[in-house]
Image: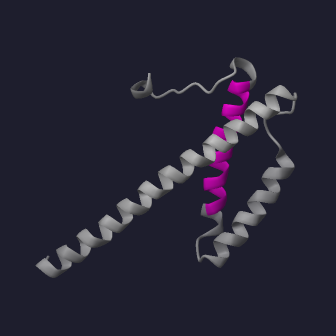
């Protein structure tokens, strides 16, 4: 590979790294909000999951993905992955009052 291609590759990777960092920070903020939802649900005896809300959100995110030229199936998979984690957090909050981490590095 020539020097110009290597420089272009490095620049693209820096941009990807910046986007990844932004995504992590956005996810952290999202989970702060969903944990507040979990505490509210726990104190008011609401169930941890809301299937109707999830269906509405999937439809909304699929439409947003199409507008953004992102595969809607990927957007739905991502959302389902995040929601599964959120529901787990809500269940933990309801039973223990807090979210436990399974990451030994955080222990």
Q: Position of residue 19 (x, y in %)?
A: 43, 62
Look at the image and tell me in which quarter the C terminus lies: top left
Q: Which residues are magenta?
A: 75-93
Is 101 part of what is drawn in magenta? no
Quarter of the image where one finds residue 15: bottom left
Residue 94 at x, y = what percent? 75, 24
Residue 105 in view of the camera: yes
Of residue 44 and residue 49, the one placed in the foreground of this image is 44
Q: Give how far across and how far down residue 73 sits, in percent.
A: 64, 64
Tally of numbered discs: 0
**Depth check: 94 or 73 in front?**
94
- Quadrant where the N terminus is found in the figure: bottom left
**Residue furthest top as drawn:** 96
Q: Is residue 79 magenta?
A: yes
Nearer to us in this view, 86 or 74: 86
Above-or-below relation of 72 to 5 = above
- Residue at image x 66%, y 32%? 89
Image point (24%, 69%), residue name: 10
**Image coordinates for residue 98, horizontal then vertical, percent:** 65, 24
* Quarter of the view holding residue 28: top right
The residue depicted at 68 percent of the width and 45 percent of the height is: 83
């Amino acid at each position: 590979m020539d020097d110009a291609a290597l420089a272009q590759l490095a620049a693209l990777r820096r941009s990807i790294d910046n986007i990844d960092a932004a995504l992590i920070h956005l996810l952290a903020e999202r989970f702060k909000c969903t944990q507040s939802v979990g505490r509210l649900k726990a104190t008011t005896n609401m169930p941890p999951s809301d299937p109707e809300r999830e269906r509405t959100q999937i439809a909304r995110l699929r439409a947003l993905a199409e507008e953004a030229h992102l595969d809607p199936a990927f957007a739905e998979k991502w959302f389902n992955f995040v929601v599964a984690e959120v529901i787990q957090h809500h269940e933990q909050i309801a039973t223990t009052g807090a979210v436990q981490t399974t990451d030994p590095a955080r222990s």
